[in-house]
Amino acid sequence: MVRLRAQRRHVRERRRRVRRPDHLPEEEAEAVSTLHPTVEKAQALIELDRYDQALALLAGRLAEDPGDLRAWVKIGYCHLGQERPKDATAAADEALRLAPEDYGALRLRAQAMVRDNGWLKVQPVLRELIRVAPHDSFAHAMLADAVWREALVRYGQESGARHLTAEAIDRVTREAADLAMEALRLGPEDIYAHEIAHRIASTAGNGTVSDMLDEAILRIDPHHAEALARQTRKAARAPGVGATEAAELYADALAAEPNSADMRDQLDHATYRLLRGTRWLALLCVGLAGAMVDLFPAADRPAPELPIPVGQRLWFLFIMGVIWAFGAWRRYSRLRAGVQLNVRSLVRRGRWARIVLAQAAWAMACALLIAEIPWTDRAVPQLLFWAGLVPTAATIWFDKKKSR
């Protein structure tokens, strides 16, 4: 119960700090006006996502006073919370009829249009919102978002190109970038402003600015899923980072943001890369077994006599044990608990993960049969050698893309 309450407080804190057009933001400008007690109760219910109860209260309030501007705005946010943008637009229109320059009503109208796929039509409302509240960072950030989207659509329609050329990047994103920079100046702690600036910088291919914005986002909100995913992915894909380190990076990111589907997918990919390594160990054992028996003797050197002595076969068992102890078990035992759990989970969930382990087991079985049976002829061991080597090596080549 204590943990659940802490999670709810964390969610409410993030809602207060992360202001985006698809969330229900605080309406700071509305604080200057006195809310009716019924509207205050409805606002408390909205913060708890109890929209039906809030709507019932607000409907009763409007029956008493149809001109309660704040009640209309709250009704609009209830409809947004219930994914009914058209009803939210109607509520915003009623509020704007009462007060055409009201900040809360204009903001609700813009958000309702965006929820109704109206990014290409929302600019006039946002410019009016900026005129009413010129120092509001959220309005500037949302306008930057709308200008950026419309500029990309217009460029694609006019040029027929699917990708921006280097010459067109500055021209297409200039106004949106200026608006985003203004939003950052007005709201240096506004997550949404940072997100839009990052999106524009990424479009322009400016990796340095994108990284700086990600770091700023994570400073404000250490649990920001998208920034955390981008930074973790960059670190995991850096040169010299192996599968083990990559898996642990993704596991750390998931510990900070457990609901990130992208990080779960990336952790599965890194875990799959770890499992792929078992096939290389098995192939190494197949090769050593073939070398011990000398399956393909050359004409200029004598081949060892068959059967191979028992001592040599036992020595080969020891060598294979060392290979697996240091190449697999020691590596697995040093993984963090979260990565170990994901290894077992992926084996249960993933068909290719089970195929990888089955192929490693098959190759090891062939290696053991080659090395431990006292063969008197090389024909059967040669067949086992190719049976253990070819299918496994061919599949390694086939699923190479899965390890990326």
Image (cartoon, rainbow, N blue to C red):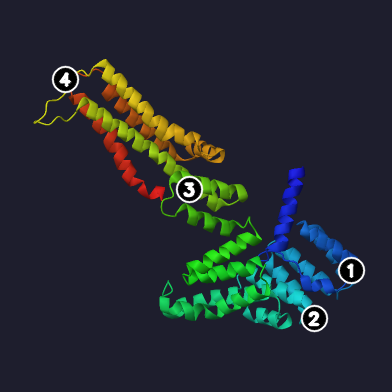
Specify few, some or many for label 2: CA neighbours under 10 Å numbering under 14, 14-19, or 20 or more: some
Q: Nearer the viewer, mark 4 or mark 2?
A: 4
Mark 1 residue type? His
Helix, strand or loop at mark 1: loop
Q: Are marks 4 and 2 in contact (CB under 8 Å)?
A: no
Instruction: Give the distance between the C-alpha atoms of the residues marked 1 and 3, in whole angstroms.
Output: 54 Å
Q: Position of residue 235 (x, y in %)?
A: 49, 54
Q: Are marks 3 and 2 in contact (CB under 8 Å)?
A: no
Helix, strand or loop at mark 3: helix
Horizontally, residue 319 falls left or right of residue 261, namely: left
Instruction: Give the distance between the C-alpha atoms of the residues marked 3 and 4, in whole angstroms.
Output: 47 Å
Specify few, some or many for label 4: CA neighbours under 10 Å numbering under 14, 14-19, or 20 or more: few
Q: Nearer the viewer, mark 1 or mark 3?
A: 3
Q: Which residue is mark 2?
A: 99
Instruction: Give the distance between the C-alpha atoms of the residues marked 1 and 4, in whole angstroms.
Output: 99 Å
Instruction: Give the distance between the C-alpha atoms of the residues marked 4 and 2, in whole angstroms.
Output: 100 Å
| N-term mark: 4 or 2 | 2
Q: Which residue is mark 3?
A: 246
| N-term mark: 3 or 2 | 2
Q: Residue furthest left?
A: 300
Q: Position of residue 226 (x, y in %)?
A: 57, 59
Q: Which residue is mark 4?
A: 305
Horizontally, residue 58 falls left or right of residue 395, namely: right
